Image: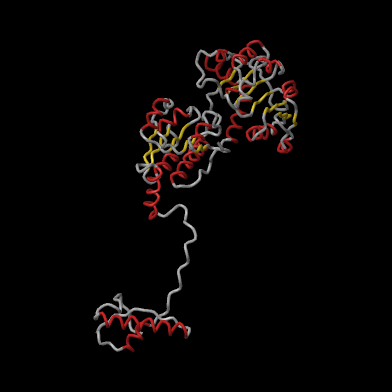
Amino acid sequence: VPQRTNLSPFQGGDKTERKHMLSASRAISRASCSAGAVLVGTRSIASRSSSFSSLVRSLARPVPQPRPLLTHLPSPLPAAFAPFQAKFSKKMSGGGAFRVVVTRNIPECALKMLRDIPGAEVEVYPHRDRAMPREEIKEQLSKGCDALLCLLTDKIDGELVDAAGGRLKVVSTMSVGYNHVDTAALKQRSISLGFTPDCLTETTADTTVVLLMATARRLGEAMAAVRDGSWGTWDPLWMCGKDVHSSTVGIVGFGRIGQAVARRLKAFGCELLYTGPREKPEAAAVGATFVTVEELFSRADFVVPMFPLNDATRGFFDLARFKMMKKDAIFINATRGEVVNQEDLYTALSTGEIAAAGLDVTVPEPLPLDSPLLTLPNCVVLPHIGSATVATREKMATMAAANIVALAGGKPLPFMAKL
């Protein structure tokens, strides 16, 4: 078979000659297919007077197999698709850049995800030592905003999101809870809400147990004694705290974090009690016993709330409930500050209704330096560090960013709250 070139056999010649050659080629293909051999091809026409038989021989070659159909798009998309994704993002933003406002400096891995959105413009509040003021959030939204990445400390309501002028498509909060978000306002405006579920359970459980042990063993007082010079010779009655091992721990609310706390305390040989709206089958794995809230308060050496904040739980721990606890009971709160009446807690601690308290959450945050709770040696206060590990905070940030990336690409939010 003569060597093929890139020149088409139908180039050159007058119109009549090209028409005859094309008809001949089609006839050859039909004849070849009926005989079981498929013939197509190209050749260089060196001379317009080439014989028909030479043309036939030059056209003969096997037909290539058909290419498979594309049944799905790869993920992530190849670079060649970037212009199309950018075009979609531009459409989502009404023709301009896809604009994202981030209300606090968050881990760089999450910021990179946002900046890698084709055609994105990302505005990040640069100050690490303070939150973005509400008026500044409104100002940034008023400049045009498609996506807002916020924190638990940002109050998100209708007035705020309306500053975006109807352009805002998603609010993604870097938190598990979203009590700071007016979900009805978002639903009314067809704005999606993203959050970061199930990412801080184990880390928060670690912090809760550390806080429990620090409060029980008076670590705050002991560390202060080292620094202020009150550490004297060994005293058999000095800085004596409460044993954690073999104690009775009552967990109020037995969700994911409550169960994680129970798993850790089981290793200390603690008797585990829990209460809530109903019994949980998961309790059997750690040997926890379901009791009424009254029985839990009367028996527990440590009382640990682990339930979400809502209208029913706001201010749940008041003076009446503290009086139901044992005089030597220790109260540990790492859930939400609003579930505690802090004035009543101060009264209970200062009058001996309970022995001590350990708090990772307060109202407000940060707790003012003149708060009466800070005057009590039997009250340990942490600055809301329940989820504060590098790995967990990076995971929270990337989950929040992933919601925005998905929206920009025309996909459902992977971590979307039900409104």
Relative to 316, is 387 on the left or the right?
Answer: left
Relative to 354, is 23 on the left or the right?
Answer: left
Nearer the observer, 402 or 347: 402
On-image quarter of the C terminus: top right
Nearer the observer, 162 or 281: 162
Relative to 61, is 258 on the left or the right?
Answer: right
Nearer the observer, 314 or 74: 314
Tell me where residue 128 sits by quadrant.
top left
- Compared with 144, 67 (above or below) is below
User: At x 47% / y 62%, what residue is drawn?
Assistant: 70
Q: Residue furthest top?
A: 351
Image x and y of residue 141, in percent = 39, 32
On-image quarter of the N terminus: bottom left
Tag count in the figure? Answer: 0
Tell me where residue 326 sits by quadrant.
top right
User: At x 52% / y 37%, what residue is drawn?
Assistant: 195
Image x and y of residue 389, in percent = 52, 34
Coloring scheme used: secondary structure
Nearer the observer, 49 or 370: 49
Image x and y of residue 273, in percent = 73, 29
Image x and y of residue 81, in percent = 39, 54
